[in-house]
Amino acid sequence: MILRVEVMASSSSSSSFFVLLLGVALFLSNEATALPELPNLTTLAFEEGYTQLFGDSNLMLHRDGRSVHLSLDRRTGAGFASQDLYRHGFFSASIKLPADYAAGVVVAFYMSNGDVFEKTHDELDFEFLGNIRGREWRVQTNVYGNGSTAVGREERYGLWFDPTEDYHQYSILWSGERIIFYIDDIPIREVVRTQAMGGDFPSKPMSLYATIWDGSTWATSGGRYKVNYKYAPYEAEFADLVLHGCAVDPIEHRTTCLGSDAAVYDTITMSADQRTAMDKFRKKHITYSYCHDRVRYPTPPPECNLGPEAEDFLASGEAKLSYRRRRGKRYGRSSVDSVL
């Protein structure tokens, strides 16, 4: 996640301060959990890159626009979008989710061009699905290209932390060659462009969106549990907003990136250490994969390479470990070691 260090005046010894600095240095040098190194990677205030999408007063700005609160009540949800379209880039936000009973609540951080290409839209999703009290929020990623919504490419994961207690960073890298989803600097999913995938790989300019809304019909246990507005307003908080991409003219769809600037995202890959970290995360935390859902897809989609890990999944696509795991909250330490 984006590191925040506060040093306060105290009677602490210099050795304690040195230990703090050493810990920070080790954190920053941990290659397995490093985000892409990009030039001029900075966070933005809301007015520098975003515009309100819907929700009126259910969108509130804090900290001089550096933090955005979206709330859901009986009247409406809320959302915002990037001012520009982008073709490729790195997009990120630190998010804190609503606490307590949140069944039916959906918080989304995603890229889409559905308003421009209604029948052939592309989409890259982080979706956070609320739950009843005592049950965990679930995180889902999805990829659509060229209107391929008939083939859902969902994956779902458990978290090693409580996402309602503090901010955690969620990021999407999108290039012409690959898509990488990150949680707190850890790569959790990679989608590599292949010939077999064809036009299903997102390729058209997209905007960045963040929303909160009522998904009672499907979000929690297939719609069994609905939003209970007795607990409203439900509030999701967004901070550390990053838009680092090739902006595109909305009329002519020409990119403003030229030469090496346009190619910078294609140069980003995962190191061996990062790939090992991703594999360990997936082994421990994935709860569903469309590639292993033999009920929906008796013949797996062409980009799915089924190896020995297929033995870890039921025919429904649910991970066997997830199926056996005791229900209820199981958050532990919010550290890299607890993930891997």
Image (cartoon, rainbow, N blue to C red):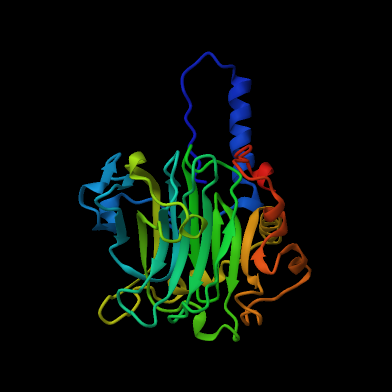
Near-viewer residue (56 or 43) = 56
Which quadrant would residue 64 be assigned to in this image?
A: top left
Residue at 29% from the left image edge and 47% from the top image edge: 73
In the image, residue 306 sits, relative to residue 279, either above or below, namely below
Report if residue 79 is visible in the image: yes
Residue at 42% from the left image edge and 62% from the top image edge: 110
Q: Position of residue 40 (x, y in %)?
A: 42, 56
Left or right? Give the position of 17 relative to 273.
Answer: left
Q: Position of residue 223 (x, y in %)?
A: 46, 58
In the image, residue 181 sits, relative to residue 122, either above or below, namely above
Q: Position of residue 317 (x, y in %)?
A: 65, 67
Near-viewer residue (175 or 194) = 194
Report if residue 36 is visible in the image: no
In the image, residue 322 sits, relative to residue 250, either above or below, namely above
**Picture mark count:** 0
Q: Position of residue 59 (x, y in %)?
A: 26, 48
